[in-house]
Image: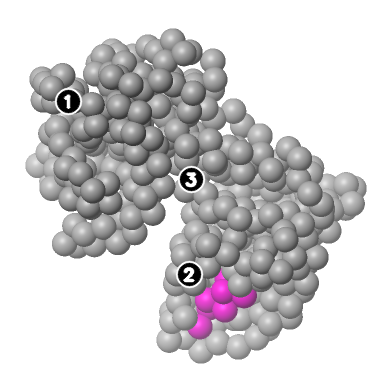
Amino acid sequence: MQLNFSGKKALVRVDFNVPLDKQYHITDDTRIREALPTIQHIIAEGGAVILMSHFGRPLAKLKEDGSINVEKFTLRHVVGPLSELLGRHVHFADNCTGPAAENAAASLQPGEVLLLENTRFHEEEEKGDEAFSQQLAALADVYVNDAFGSAHRAHASTTIVAKFFPKDRKSFGFLMEKELKNAAKVQKDPERPLTAIIGGAKVSDKIKLLDRLVEFVDTLIIGGAMAYTFFRAQGGATGNSLVEEDKLDLALSLIEKAKKRGVVLLLPVDSIAADAFAETAAHRVEPSNAISDGWMGLDIGPEAQKTFSEAILGSKTIFWNGPMGVFEMAPFAGGTKTIAETVARATKENGAFSLIGGGDSVAAINQLDLGDQVSFVSTGGGAMLEFMEGKVLPGVKAIES
């Protein structure tokens, strides 16, 4: 961050969309912790910090009477934990615009922190409304975007608000800078061999990503339920495994594209198959292209784990997005666990650069307490995928233009 914050009020877009339990206690504060360096830097330079964030989708989940469930979606739940992490009191405004926000921002002194209420309580946020954005911008002297997880959205608080600050009064925060720098290490100038590991349920969710990765990786590993669409496309038997019948031609074209470009495409040769989608289901190892009728593949098998691990350990750059199976269920978590441990080992023992690209892969890495044993864990699932697809992220463009 090249801005001078001394005596200035900084409007900082963070991503405090954190998970809560039924008692509204935060169950994972990673996103809050990742925002601390930017907040602390502004305070240290003598600035005041005005934080804004979305939290859930309150307008999509209105109460039966048509009103918003404020208690469920208020950012007030973040005030206590954030105050504790910063070691100072955090003020709270019960709106992000209007008198409540304006008065709280006006009275803010250097070194103080103000958290605004959930921006998504206003429909203007997701619409990217300019008048709403201008009201947000009027609260501060400078704007800092540190919410990589929302950078792919052209929303008011992530993108449009930046229009109202000249280039010398807007900047990325430290987290955004880290995210972009590490993503570029994979996408623009990777040390080779470069291996991408893509998992998850549906080919349709990641088709653009797969199509892009085939253009620049050396090895592409495909696991998770999406692998069965590839096996079905090649004439395999997949039982009751999840298959996207309308994506079979797409899967074949990806296989062909990989061949033409000399990319090693690895699919799981075997699977842990179950007779029901349940933790208590009977399960056994079956060839992934010959799953029995009435059975479904829910994880990669031991041979696939071995093949995938060998490819990962032979890599110098690794990008991982998506689990290898239904890792929330203990009998089908082995594949994801093996991949996580192997990525960590490749990083630690072989000096590979490893980027965990958001989403469930991050949950898996954190559950296994391996976050500090990989090179970088991204906070932005959707944003990271779109960046890897080669898209220009609106939140990034707004700062750079």
Instruction: Verify whether residue 335 appears in magenta.
Output: yes
**Judging from the image, what secondary structure is the residue with disc 3 in?**
loop
Main structural element of the magenta stretch: helix, strand or loop? helix
Taking the spot 65% from the left edge, 45% from the top edge, the residue there is: 209
Instruction: Give the label on residue 23, or none.
Output: none
Q: Residue at x 36, y 44 (%)?
A: 36
> Which is in the foreground here, disc 1 or disc 2?
1
**Which one is in front in this view, the residue at disc 3 or the one at disc 1?**
1
Of label 1 and label 2, which has the lower sequence position? 1
Query: Which amino acid, by three-letter code, is at mark 3?
Result: Gly
Q: Quadrant of residue 146?
A: top left
> Where residue 108 is drawn, which disc sits there?
1
Say which residue label 2 marks. 369
Mark 2 vs mark 3: give the one in front: 2
The answer to whether residue 15 is seen in the rendering is: no
Residue picked out by circle 3: 380
- Packing grade of label 1 (10 A; few <14, some 14-19, many >=20) is some
Q: Is residue 343 visible?
A: yes
Measured in 3D between alpha carbons, the distance from the residue under mark 2 to the one under mark 3, in whole angstroms, is: 19 Å
Measured as percent of width and height from the top left, residue 194 is found at: 77, 53
242 left or right of 218 in image: left
Position of the C terminus, as image quadrant, is top right
44 in magenta: no
Q: Position of residue 94 (x, y in %)?
A: 13, 34
Q: Secondary structure at mark 1?
A: loop
